[in-house]
Image (cartoon, helix red, strand yellow):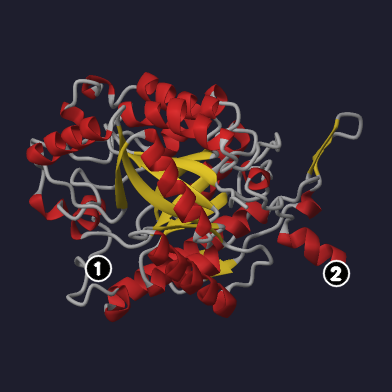
Amino acid sequence: MTEKVHIAVALDGAGWHPAAWREPTARPTELTTAGYWRDLVRAADDAGVVFATIEDALTLEGRTAEADAGIRRDRVRGRLDALLVASFLAPLTRRIGLIPTVTTTHPEPFHLATGLQTLDHASLGRAGARIVAGSSPQERANFGRRGDGPVGFPASGHVEDDPAWQAAFREAGEVVDAIRRLADSWEDDAIIRDVESGRFLDRERVHNADFEGEFFSITGASIVPRSPQGQPLITALAHQSIPHRFAAEHADVVFITPGGAEEAAVIVAEVEQAAAEVRDEPERLRVFADLLVLIEATEAAAVEAWDRLEERAPIATDAHIAIGTAATIIDEIRTLAAAGVDGIRLRPARLPADLTAITEQVIPVARAAGILHDDDASPTLRQRLGLPLRSSRFAAQEVSA
């Protein structure tokens, strides 16, 4: 029996390859236009992609391994704010989930929470967030409010060996907790709108979040009423033990970067073990494997295109790379599905070229082959992924009281 998965896409500028902007199919003059992002995400939406993540960073250098190289003139530099882009796209799309990247170190948790709740309202229940922990020295310099934090990765390559990274993930956990508490602060039926009595609001159903943590505290309710999903979908990219545990404890979906199906099975087992140890959520953590793709009509054409990109600017990536035809990508998807993942997040090497190949070739064939979950027309992103809508924790307290 074929294991079924969801297909998501990860969108970043002109594509995930640093030389993608130089391709003849690229649209480098449009990267900071609303129309560019509208075209990309509408195409994914029409094809049945379950959600799109939108990359973001708080420095011009970005968050890549080559960030220390400074503001290079041969790389795409400059971007639009991912949360604002997602909010713009919300009324222009129908089914696709919209998941902007948000960094937890510098933005105020209250602002993140209200922005994500607003996105959930604007999209009628299709909002999520990709949580990024920590910050670079360049990001801290941009904000100018704090000097502490990680300085690159420790020599061992393991974040658990660096107290600054450990603190960054604890802080990120608090931010997610605050986002969830603020989303819960309004109960579903808090707004009455009774014109005759003059009561717009049942104030007994609006609650203070009252969060007190190691890094910040919040007292008060959200300014945004309860949104369609109850809480936005929380996602995180995880490469090793502390991020795995962070995702297991705080996220609904985790993105992993296996080198192949065998490694994917090992990582899935590690994530499940972490969830068994730290997860309080009743719902199982969903696991999506990342795959960076370049797709052409023939294998030879794909290799030629990849070699051209690599000659211009070699890529440094955490994701497994699949180069070939649509059939090549479908084979990769099939083997990852057999390894036990719930979905595949495809990173197009070139935009829009590889996204077009995904939407017009990969997804239709994969659907016909029975690899993809059927779209049951569920109205929200949570429901589409098989996750229940969340009830307010305060309503649950009222019932138990």
- Compared across the picture, whether 181 is left or right of 345 comes to right
Residue at (59% x, 72% y) in the render: 279
Q: Name the residue under label 2.
A: 400
Amino acid tagged 1:
Pro
Q: Does 305 appear above or below 223? A: above
Question: Which type of secondary structure does the marked residue at label 2 adopt?
Answer: helix
Residue at (39% x, 34% y) in the render: 326
Q: In which quarter of the image is residue 53?
A: top left
- Compared across the picture, whether 394 is left or right of 335 comes to right
**Residues under labels 1 and 2: Cα distance?**
43 Å
Disc on the earlier residue, 1 or 2: 1
Q: Quadrant of residue 65?
A: bottom left
Towards the viewer: 363 or 13: 363
Q: Does 60 appear above or below 35? A: below
Question: Which type of secondary structure does the marked residue at label 1 adopt?
Answer: loop
* Residue 275 percent coordinates (x, y): 55, 73
Kindly identify which numbered label has been placed on residue 150. 1
Q: Residues within 10 Å of mark 2 (few under 14, many from 20)?
A: few
Confirm whether residue 10 shows in the render. Answer: no
* Residue 206 percent coordinates (x, y): 73, 52
Residue at (39% x, 51% y) in the render: 290
Q: Residues within 10 Å of mark 1 (few under 14, many from 20)?
A: some
Residue at (36% x, 65% y) in the render: 239
Amino acid tagged 2:
Ser
